[in-house]
Amino acid sequence: MNLDDLVSTSAALMRQRLGARQPRIAVLLGSGWGPLAEQVQDAVSVPYSDLPAFPVLAIGGHAGVLKAGRLGAQEVIVLAGRKHSYETGAADGMKGVIRTLAALGVQVLVQTNAAGSLDATMPPGSVMLIEDHLNVVQMSPLVGEKGDSRFVDMGAAYCPTLRARAQAAAVAATGQAMPRGVYAWVLGPQFETPAEIRMLQAFGAQAVGMSTVPETILARHAGLRVLALSMMTNMAAGLSSETLSHGHTMATAQAASARAVQLLVAVVQGLETPT
Ligand code: HPA
């Protein structure tokens, strides 16, 4: 089966499971954001493994399951876990997921991730609103696509209207606007060198991470609007005396997750689906 067929099959299966639900917002959970899934009400759970267009995920836990239901008044699909490019060397691991969401009528993709901070005013635990990105890897999930639509305009990759609504919701919920910045995508899985971090700072990045950018490109190509939040789990290499490790990243993410998830709930509830 080609990808289009896998997407059609996955969307048909999802429509059956969704029943009367008509989610227009999907939330993709990265490291540290998993507890959001527990907040979905009247949820129907679907393992990625039931959906042939979805990737097989390497990591365990609650990853690899989507939940469709409500966050307050918003109908949502919450997706726990993504395929990372550092697993395979390919940038298109989430193509089937994004295409299936688009086929279901989802209009907004809210992405979350864990990232290293390049900005001393955003210490670990901070949540940054992504304004723009740097595709440092210079890989695209659209390689091999045909037609003019592959030449996607990335001038407003992170929807200005959604960003304004997210900030308004953050201010209402916490009394403060979120720090904003540019997210640089690196391939990983190794962390950066201090020299690479100085380069990214010179490039204008405030955060660095190993995800999100391919999905943003896929979403824009599929006509979805994108909003993205980064949880700072560490100061990037060379900016603190700490040795970086996955364990350290995950421990910080866990400690910061309750507050971050509360903020995310407020942000999602504050989004009106653009028509
Ligand atoms: N670099 C890249 N990816 C990351 C980092 C980092 O410092 N922290 C969390 N994800």
Image (cartoon, rainbow, N blue to C red):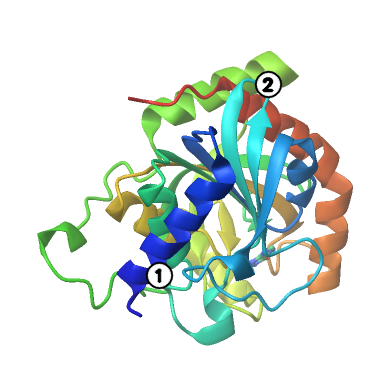
Please give the residue where the numbered disc 1 appears in the rendered image: 6
Q: Residue at x 86, y 53 (%)?
A: 254
Q: Is residue 129 above or below residue 90?
A: above
> In what quadrant of the picture does the C terminus appear?
top left
Snapshot quadrant of residue 63:
bottom right
> Which element type, helix, strand or loop, lies under badge 1?
helix
Query: Could you tell me residue 165's position as x and y percent?
Result: 50, 22
Q: Residue furthest bottom?
A: 88
Query: Could you tell me residue 257's position as x and y percent?
Result: 81, 45
Observer able to see residue 128:
yes
Q: Is residue 244 above or below residue 223?
A: below
Observer able to see residue 135:
no
Please give the residue where the numbered disc 2 appears in the rendered image: 176
Q: Is residue 141 above or below residue 223?
A: below
Q: Is there CB contact under 8 Å for labels 2 and 1?
A: no
179 to the left or right of 205 = right
- Which one is in front, 86 or 252? 86
Q: Residue at x 68, y 21 (%)?
A: 176
- Which one is in front, 183 or 23? 23
Give amino acid for label 2. Answer: Gln
Q: Residue furthest left?
A: 148
- Count the marks: 2
> In what quadrant of the picture does the N terminus appear?
bottom left
